[in-house]
Amino acid sequence: MSVVGCEPDYGMNYEVVEEIQPTEVVIDSLIQPSPPEKLDVLIILDTSGSMTDNFQQVAAGVELLREDIETITLDYRIGFINSGLSRTPYFVGPYDYTASLIDFLMAPYTLGGDYLEQGFQAMYEFATTTTEGAMFFREDADKLFIFVSDEDEQGAIPTAIFRDWLVTHFDKTQHDVVTIVQVENGLCSYTSTYDVGHRFIDLSAYYGKNAVDLCSDWEVWLTDSTFLVGAQQHINLTRSPLVESIVVYRNGIETELWYYGAQTNTVYLDFAPDPGDLIEVGYVIL
């Protein structure tokens, strides 16, 4: 006689639970401004000895910028100050549509050579304490500030405080900032981290853009670096996105005319928005 034992049939069930990462939706936006009717352009130029090789490029860049400005308005002023105000002349200009090419070529060389590389402080003092500054800035004109240096900003004013001052001091008009400096992994063969314009780079970031590489051919596309002269066609994202989640809207209507640059964390538009257009970039972050 045999005995057959029956055992219960227990099955092993495994449930794989995927951990859901918390996400957040971010929206960055811009409203395309109207072209200025009046424009004051101030170039804050490092005139220390190491910068003299760059003066010709500065002059050429400003001349090209002037040509682009004149497609928008003839009511503009361009002036130059050195980055210390300790050597005279610390200001040359103002130049307008009657200025010659030679005027712009000579302007950087006319400024006093100044070893103080404190562009923020120099501009603050120029605007608030000098007769030339009081005469140069017009209350009803938009402002473009261009900082050019081959070293970091060395003044006493922190970047965030300087930016807050710009916003409050020039609150009646539009203003924009362009910084042309040595950047990390750029084309300049800098020998020290102090040569990199970290504080200028931070200032550019407040205006939603990257600093311009001093050793690049920046004079050719200087106009593209400011919305006051050329239409703004990019948005620097404030956070790192899940790329596949990026959605771009123009006046509330989705558009596919854009591409994403991972290296700069920027959405570039394949069109020039019209004045008053609202561009929104929505994306998910982890």
Image: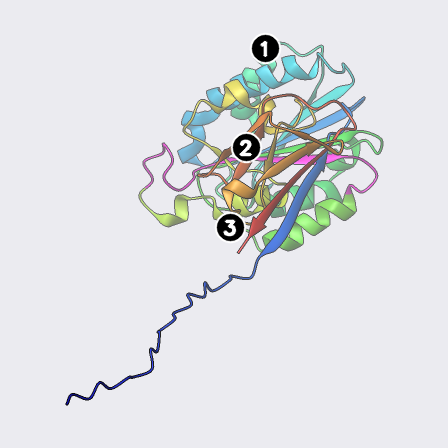
Percent position of residue 78, x then y: 68, 24
Q: In this view, does 100 lie above or below 166?
A: above
Q: How far apart are marks 2 and 3 (CA)?
A: 18 Å
User: Farthest front residue?
Assistant: 1
- At label 1, counting other C-alpha atoms closer than 10 Å, the crowd grade (few under 14, some 14-19, many 20 or more) is few
Q: Earlier in the sequence, mark 1 or mark 3?
A: 1
Q: Earlier in the sequence, mark 2 or mark 1?
A: 1
Q: Is residue 223 visible?
A: yes
User: Which residues fall within the magenta stretch?
Assistant: 170-190
Three-letter code, disc 2: Gly
Residue at (55%, 18%) from the top-left corner?
106
Of residue 261 and residue 213, the one placed in the foreground of this image is 261
Does the magenta portion include 280? no
Q: Is residue 112 above or below residue 6?
A: above
The residue identified by callout 2 is: 112
Total marks drawn?
3
- At label 3, counting other C-alpha atoms closer than 10 Å, the crowd grade (few under 14, some 14-19, many 20 or more) is some
Q: Which of marks 2 and 3 is nearer the N terminus?
A: 2
Three-letter code, disc 3: Gln
Three-letter code, disc 1: Leu
Q: In front: mark 2 or mark 3?
A: 3
The residue identified by callout 1 is: 101
Of helix, strand and loop, which one carries label 2? loop
Percent position of residue 256, x then y: 60, 27
The residue identified by callout 3 is: 154
